[in-house]
Image (cartoon, rainbow, N blue to C red):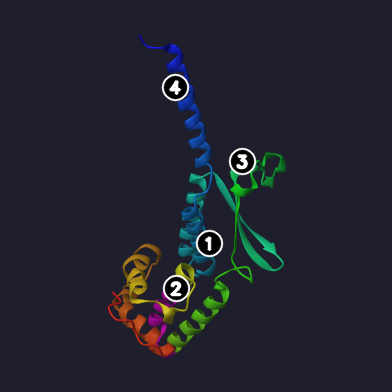
Amino acid sequence: MTDQNAIDAEAEADAGDGAEAETDDTELPRDVVDEIERLTRLERSAVDDNEIEAYETRRDELLDEHDFTARIRDEDGDDVLVLHPEEWHEDGVIRTDRIEDIDRAAEIYLEGTEDPDDWEAVDERNRALVADVREAHGDVHGDNAALLADFAGNHYAKPMESLTSEELAEFRRDYVVRNAWPSEKQQEVIAESVRLVFETAGEPVPESQF
């Protein structure tokens, strides 16, 4: 004979497990935070309106999936990306009485000394190299160099000429396909453009880059 009390106790335990799982789901996973940061950096560095809109849309979709909001806060002249649970807000204002666990929030320095990768300095260096490539080899190669600068800075926070063969393969096979909108002319010469970036920087081109 089935013990009804045992069934009820098991049901309560299952409900408790479900509630705990639901609580865990309200946290913003680390990989999602990283992706939101990446998309924000890409949006800030992009110059094409369609590209900017695409990054914004994807970031907003990720935030909506987890019921979070994002804003940029100025902290002593440095921009900080702030991610908060949507439930903390009312009419765009933080309700402190709704904050039950401050650790649910996430803050990412996008510039300044608190940015561990010194992303801004890396980006400035890469943009200078893009300008050199454009001046020496024309706009098509310059535009491709700009794509590589976006990739190197936003994905690896490193100078373009420091990218490895594996990272360059990722750029060509993944980043260019999914995140960039190169023209037909750009696509035809992208391998040559990468070579010109390294040559302009005075560095050897990694072998087996694609």
In which quadrant of the rendered image does the N terminus lie?
Answer: top left
How far apart are the alpha carbons under marks 4 and 3? 31 Å
Neighbour class for label 2 at 10 Å: few (<14), some, many (≥20)? many
Residue 95 belongs to magenta span: no
The answer to whether the residue labelled 1 contacts the one labelled 3, judged by CB atoms less than 8 Å apart, is no
Helix, strand or loop under label 3: helix
Q: Position of residue 111 (x, y in %)?
A: 61, 69
Q: Quadrant of residue 179?
A: bottom left
Query: How far is mark 4 from mark 1, CA to CA?
Result: 45 Å
Identify residue type, mark 1: Thr
Bounds of the magenta segment: 136-149
* Measured Cα–Cα span from mark 1 to mark 3: 22 Å
Which image quarter: residue 209? Answer: bottom left
Q: CA distance from mark 2 to mark 3?
A: 35 Å
Classify mark 1: residues with Cα within 10 Å, few (<14), some (14-19) or many (20+). Answer: many
Q: Which residue is mark 3?
A: 87
**CB-based contact (under 8 Å), mark 2 and mark 3:** no
Please name the residue that numbered disc 4 is placed on: 10
Q: Which residue is mark 1?
A: 40
Q: Residues within 10 Å of mark 4 (few under 14, many from 20)?
A: few
Please indicate whether residue 174 sits to the left or right of residue 121 in the image.
left
Q: Amino acid at mark 3?
A: Glu
Type of amino acid at the residue the image marks with label 4: Glu
Task: Find disc 2 in the rendering and name its residue.
Answer: 152
C-alpha gap between disc 2 and disc 4: 53 Å
Kind of residue sitting beneath label 2: Ala
Q: Is residue 3 above or below residue 129?
A: above
Residue at image coords 50%, 69%: 46
